[in-house]
Amino acid sequence: MMRVAPAALIVAMMAAAGLAGCGGGGGGSSSTPSGGSTSTSATASIQIPPSALSALGPSFDGYTPTFWYPANNADPNNEPSAVVTVSTTALTGLPSPQPTGTQLLNVTFRLTAAVTFQGCPYFSPVTIPSYLVTAGRTFYESTYDLTTHAVMNCNPTSSSLNGLTLTFSGFPEPPVLTTLTLNSTDIYAAVLSYQ
């Protein structure tokens, strides 16, 4: 499960992934540097208005996360955005505690400006691919600040699966977080895993 560190952990999640528009969507895939057709991730940019909203993130390899964020202090006249990247390549060198079980998906993001949220931003629900064997599995979402190499306290306390829709709930873990400031210099990551 995720631990919340200062704003840096959430920002790292946003920097790696790029979501577009308050209504969600947008984005594309990045290709291998050699110019081959092997896609390793998808990126989109999502605007962050001051009110609580959710937006679909980029789709990759059958996964589509929804980026949900609480009310915040974003400037309504110059809304920042979260650049969100979705990838199935496992993240290495994460601080302890590591994600539980096997890493399935990582969503990284960076904010274009510092934002103070009234709680934890998170990724839920997540559409999962039909090829994923889910019987008897428990799913987890763990959050990290990749820049400061810290665990964030924004982990859900439970998950449920309905068809191909995976929903996390119970954000954040105790102690209850009242505000969380994420800056524009850190990259934040949410790791979806199962066991």
Image (cartoon, rainbow, N blue to C red):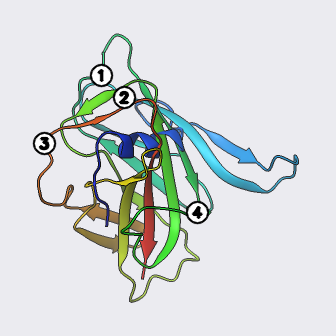
* Mark 2 crowd level (few <14, some 14–19, many ≥20, 10 Å Cα): many
Residue flagged by tag 4: what amino acid is it?
Gly
Q: Is residue 131 above or below residue 65?
A: below
Q: Report the Cα–Cα distance between label 1 and label 4.
A: 32 Å
Label 3, on which residue? 178
Q: Quadrant of residue 50?
A: top left
Q: Is residue 164 visible?
A: no
Residue flagged by tag 2: what amino acid is it?
Ile
47 lies left or right of 122: right
Residue 168: x %, y % from top left: 29, 63
Q: Report the Cα–Cα distance between label 4 and label 3.
A: 34 Å
Q: Give the mark, 1 or 4, whose residue is nearer the N terminus.
A: 4
> Quick check: marks 1 and 4 in contact, CB under 8 Å?
no
Q: Is residue 94 above or below residue 113?
A: below
Q: Quadrant of the N terminus?
A: bottom left
Q: Report the Cα–Cα distance between label 2 and label 4.
A: 25 Å
Please tell me the numbered disc located at residue 62: 4
